[in-house]
Amino acid sequence: MLDCPNPPPVTVVVDPCDDVVHTRAALASHAPQHGRLTVHPTPGTDAAIALAYDVLAALGKPVPLTGYRPLDAGPAWSIAAAWILATPITHLTLLRAHLLTPHRFRALLTLRRRTGVRLILVCHHRAMRAFLERELRQVEHSIGEACALLPEAEPTTLQRKTPQAERPLANRWISLPALTTLKALDDAAGPCRCAAPMAADRDFFPPVMPPVTQTEVAWRLHHATAHPHLAAELATAAFTAASTTQLNTVHVRDLGPDASTITLHDHGLRRGCMTHSVPAWASPLLRAAALLWHLTAGSSGPLFSDPLGSEGLPSLTAFAEDCKLRPPQPPRPKPRRGRRGTAPSAKGTEKTIWPVCTAHFGLSWARDEPDLMQGCPYPPPHTRKTIERRKKGWLPPDYGLRELRHLR
């Protein structure tokens, strides 16, 4: 299990007059992308799980957590530690620290020891509680005045809260060709420990997402769930075009150093075992999934499963639909013209179609399978030869149909 032997000293900021200027300065310093997290505890509660939810909410994760016992605070603190380690968080500032209870303060110290984060406690009171002074004697700490450590925020800093530029793809369905091959016909085999070559060496090139799509997909996966394994699994499917069978073969050991590569296994059913480079937008998600295993249960389990034993979580396809991510859908039928003077009928919610595509299978039996695409377009070319043919205009738009497979 991960543990920081020499965490940074705890900093206690004393604000005896509870000056709003210092509170604003602490809130203005909240910038997770730059490593600084400011947590404003939920008033009226002293439960440790509520404080863990406050930390997750400051990280941008939806709370409360689902899949665990309602009053069990352990999973929430472990998941918060995994996200802090996977993202560039180095400072955690807690407001209203003078209201801390012993069990909440010990939970914060455990989080500090697990992650090595620099803990800053802001006490809006003339004197700290007796237990807090007693606990602080056992850890390295320093005490300072708010006037020196939390100066008045500059007007430009306060004005940063203006609405940010809108995301071009916000609230829109995104069709990812890589998800066309997500559903599979076969079952997962036993674990594999092979040294798989890179995907390019096997002449396999998953569909590439435009930068604006990558940014939007990463934003949705970070904010759609607090469970790292769910976000990491869907992210891997999006940049590898893997099936659920291949995703189920990935163990923690298959993730390379610094989450730069990931190895997928399929025992020769498709293109063979191969290693994919992890794009920068997906690396924190995969790191968080692996770190949760290192924090709680070691490093030998399936990467895309929850070591904390959550129950009742959505399936991968249901989670993708919650994120408004799906494979390209069949073309919509042309709307019928209504009678003169009649109002057009309201459009109902269309159900997402998840096809079963055998385009990446390498065995002969896959060619005899019935067409289960349900009208969805086949994935784009995935080999160097077919990609070059596509660039030269040699491949028809319906590439991937069974009668055209001899062109690959």
Image (cartoon, grey):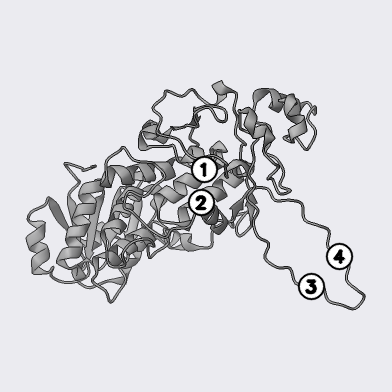
Across and down, in percent, residue 277 comes to 49, 31
Q: Amino acid at mark 4?
A: Arg
Q: Nearer the viewer, mark 3 or mark 1?
A: 1
Q: Amino acid at mark 1?
A: Thr
Residue bearing the label numbered 1: 244
Mark 2 crowdedness (10 Å alpha carbons): few <14, some 14-19, many ≥20: some
Q: Amino acid at mark 3?
A: Ser
Residue bearing the label numbered 3: 345
Closer to the chain start, of discs 1 and 2, is 1
Residue at 29% of width from left, 42% of height from top? 294
Query: Which residue is farthest right?
Result: 340
Verify CB contact (< 8 Å) between mark 4 and mark 3.
Answer: no
Verify CB contact (< 8 Å) between mark 1 and mark 2.
Answer: yes
Residue bearing the label numbered 4: 336
Residue at 80% of width from left, 33% of height from top? 396
- Residue at mark 1 to residue at mark 2: CA–CA distance: 9 Å
Across and down, in percent, residue 274 comes to 50, 27
Q: Quadrant of the N terminus?
A: top left
Residue bearing the label numbered 2: 316
Q: Is 71 rendered above or below residue 332? A: below
Verify CB contact (< 8 Å) between mark 4 and mark 2.
Answer: no
Indicate the secondary structure of the residue bearing disc 2.
helix
- Residue at mark 4 to residue at mark 1: CA–CA distance: 38 Å
Judged left or right of residue 55, residue 139 is left
Q: Is 191 rendered above or below residue 371? A: above
Q: Nearer the viewer, mark 2 or mark 3?
A: 2
- Residue at mark 3 to residue at mark 1: CA–CA distance: 38 Å
